[in-house]
Image: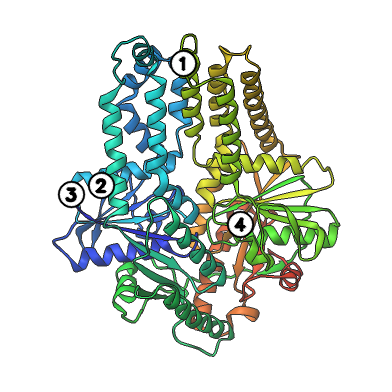
């Protein structure tokens, strides 16, 4: 069995850089070992970090002139389609011949509404790599925390989908058993093979796999890391952290005030992580102000995992950009959705937009996070729960971190109870068909895709829009999974149609009618959401990014995908930009970082112009509390 290593962490902490450095170092240090690095993040940056073009399968990456490393940037859609194509015909034939569903009704479910396609694709990629026997070490660069937890829980979820397939194709078996026959479970060959895939990956994840937790010295990052590791331990398959990487630290103090603060934060973070993870190896990666890509990865790997001093010879590019003052934009749309790569400051910008709307427009504001790993409580310095509650002592400024998973689970439990009441579970006489429908509906409810819980949270937010003067801000999940949410309405309409067809045969039963009304209402809300997102007068998308090479490339891809979905992102916030007089000074690290930022800003100006791009200065501290938000929203800049 190959050695399996997962690098996990909050978005934006440098998981891809750290995991790539680890993989490159292992490939060079162990020339007889075959090392593979796999990215399961829907918003990939592995190709950008390695500075090579990666295809849909594992590709050989030259390291020091010889091929010693393989890299795979998983194409979720293609990976899943290839897997499904092998079984599509047999699966559709089985379900069509033995259930109430036609091929035309089931096929769209297979194409668009299977549980969390990105996570399923990641699961299949890990399985393929393990089963290939080609690799001695497999390094997995994961998506941000909340969605990586979904990946780890997916084996159980995918098993429920297999249960649905068995139930959907088992009417003949149920009838045969009821009338004295010996019915066979359908499609046993491919379902057995699918279960084997699930079990092998589950065994690998829960067995010898190592988990490297990546964090940065910032309090927000540390707090989220500690919260999620508690969830890992409490999961159905408890997972323990093997080692911790404190990335982007400042190890040596300088005369620069900003760097001195970061050096102190690094020391505090090291002490905290040693207390929280006793007996675990703690690695530290230094922030030099330069991007770590391509040939610099080996030196970075040696620095982090062997403790060698980092000496990156990356020349800062020449760029000259001037800034002019701007006003914070007003919230003129009822709904605002704030998107961006993990770790770029979406939550801070969301809070700032809301705070400014309260201070200047005096409008009621509700800000809600649908990120599986939220951090609004860090920004507002108070506990934020699933219930919308006032923040910063303002009764008309409210916030919630929606527990979408629990909310959706409660809705499903309510429907299951109604199904139990409407469709008895006994199999006597005329109740045979009712029993089958009961099993089928239960199975359908159990395969609702990961990510649909976020849509359910959006439904709750739609209710807030009923108050016409109120502005609603959604602090979204990181890029790849936010896009999945925006694609989900189409998937859920298909799912609700299947539910309604299952109930149609029993439409005369009062409680069956009640369940049908719930499902129909669900479908109607889905349509409302889809219509709202397409209405440029009702909804606005704000994109947050950092002035760095990798976030810049990911933002370009994000804007392109928005256009494909028919959505327009009219405004970009470039966050944490170092200014010469207020952040960089003569510090070499800050000067180098600033020059790289200016290069990215010059590119943005060429691509998007100046009117739709705001620049937010790096305040050298985390924005938390009322006074910090007031200072933060007191200034804003544009590229001149």
Which residue is at the front of the view, 186 or 432? 432
For label 2, the SS is helix
Q: Earlier in the sequence, mark 3 or mark 4?
A: 3
Q: CA distance from mark 2 to mark 4?
A: 35 Å
- Residue at which label 2 appears: 129
Depth check, mark 2 against mark 4: the one in front is: 2
- Residue at which label 3 appears: 134
Image coordinates of residue 307 in percent, x first then y, are 32, 79
Q: CA distance from mark 3 to mark 1?
A: 41 Å
Name the mark on residue 544: 4
Q: Earlier in the sequence, mark 3 or mark 1?
A: 1
Q: CA distance from mark 2 to mark 3?
A: 8 Å
CB under 8 Å between discs 2 and 3:
yes
Q: CA distance from mark 3 to mark 4?
A: 40 Å
Which residue is pictured at 49% across the width and 28% down the height? Answer: 442
Q: Earlier in the sequence, mark 2 or mark 3?
A: 2
Q: Earlier in the sequence, mark 2 or mark 1?
A: 1
Residue 9 in view of the camera: yes
Left or right: 177 in relation to 598: left
Near mark 1 (Cα within 10 A), the count class, few <14, some 14-19 or many ≥20, is some
Up/down of 578 relative to 540, above or below = below
Name the mark on residue 101: 1
CB under 8 Å between discs 2 and 1:
no
Near mark 2 (Cα within 10 A), the count class, few <14, some 14-19 or many ≥20, is some
């Amino acid at each position: 069995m190959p050695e399996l290593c997962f690098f996990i962490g909050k978005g934006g902490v440098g998981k891809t850089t750290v995991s790539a450095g680890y993989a490159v170092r292992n490939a060079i240090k162990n020339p007889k070992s075959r090392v593979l690095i796999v990215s399961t993040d829907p918003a990939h940056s592995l190709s950008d970090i390695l500075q090579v073009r990666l295809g849909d399968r594992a590709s050989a990456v030259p390291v020091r002139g010889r091929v010693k490393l393989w890299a795979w940037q998983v194409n979720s859609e293609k990976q899943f389609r290839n897997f499904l194509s092998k079984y599509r015909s047999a699966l559709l034939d089985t379900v069509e011949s033995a259930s109430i569903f036609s091929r035309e009704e089931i096929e769209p479910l297979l194409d668009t509404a299977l549980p969390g396609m990105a996570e399923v694709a990641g699961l299949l990629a890990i399985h393929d790599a393990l089963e290939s026997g080609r690799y001695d070490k497999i390094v997995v660069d994961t998506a941000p925390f909340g969605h990586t937890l979904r990946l780890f829980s997916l084996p159980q979820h995918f098993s429920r989908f297999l249960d649905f397939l068995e139930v959907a194709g088992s009417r003949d078996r149920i009838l045969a058993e009821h009338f004295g026959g010996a019915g066979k479970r359908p499609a046993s060959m491919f379902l057995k093979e699918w279960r084997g895939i699930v079990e092998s990956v589950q065994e690998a994840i829960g067995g010898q796999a190592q988990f490297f937790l990546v964090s940065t010295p910032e309090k927000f990052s540390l707090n989220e890391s500690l919260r999620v590791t508690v969830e890992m331990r409490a999961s159905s398959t408890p997972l323990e952290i093997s080692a911790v990487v404190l990335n982007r630290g400042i190890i040596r103090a300088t005369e620069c005030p900003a760097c001195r603060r970061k050096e102190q934060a690094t020391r505090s973070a090291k002490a905290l992580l040693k207390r929280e993870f006793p007996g675990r190896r703690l690695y530290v990666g230094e922030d030099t102000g330069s991007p770590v890509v391509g040939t610099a990865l080996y030196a970075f790997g040696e620095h982090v995992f062997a403790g060698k001093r980092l000496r990156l010879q990356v020349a800062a590019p020449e760029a000259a950009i001037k800034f002019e003052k701007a006003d914070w934009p007003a919230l003129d749309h009822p709904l605002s959705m704030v998107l961006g790569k993990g770790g770029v400051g979406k939550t801070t910008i969301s809070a700032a937009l809301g705070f400014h709307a309260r201070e200047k427009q005096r409008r009621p504001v509700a800000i809600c996070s649908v990120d599986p790993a939220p951090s609004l409580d860090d920004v507002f310095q108070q506990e934020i729960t699933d219930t919308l509650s006032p923040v910063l002592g303002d009764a008309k400024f409210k916030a919630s971190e929606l527990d979408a998973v629990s909310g959706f689970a409660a809705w499903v439990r309510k429907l299951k109870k109604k199904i139990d009441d409407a469709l008895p579970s006994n199999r006597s006489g005329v109740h045979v068909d009712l029993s089958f429908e009961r099993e089928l509906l239960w199975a359908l409810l159990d395969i609702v895709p990961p990510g649909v819980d976020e849509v359910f949270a959006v439904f709750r937010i739609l209710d807030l829009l009923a108050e016409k003067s109120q502005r609603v801000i959604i602090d979204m999940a990181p890029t790849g999974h936010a896009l999945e949410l925006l694609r989900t309405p189409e998937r859920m309409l298909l799912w609700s149609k299947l539910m309604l067809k299952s109930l149609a045969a029993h439409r005369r039963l009062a409680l069956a009618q009640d369940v049908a009304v719930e499902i129909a209402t669900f479908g109607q809300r889905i349509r409302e959401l889809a219509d709202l997102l397409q209405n440029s007068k009702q909804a606005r998308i704000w994109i947050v990014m950092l002035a760095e090479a990798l976030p810049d490339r990911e933002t370009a891809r994000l804007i392109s995908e928005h256009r494909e979905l028919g959505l327009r992102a009219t405004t970009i916030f470039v966050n944490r930009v170092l200014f010469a007089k207020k952040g960089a000074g003569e510090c070499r690290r800050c000067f180098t970082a600033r020059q790289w930022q200016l290069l990215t800003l010059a590119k943005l100006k060429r691509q998007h112009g100046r009117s739709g791009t705001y620049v937010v200065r790096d305040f050298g501290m985390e924005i938390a509390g009322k006074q910090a938000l007031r200072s933060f929203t007191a200034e804003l800049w544009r590229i001149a």
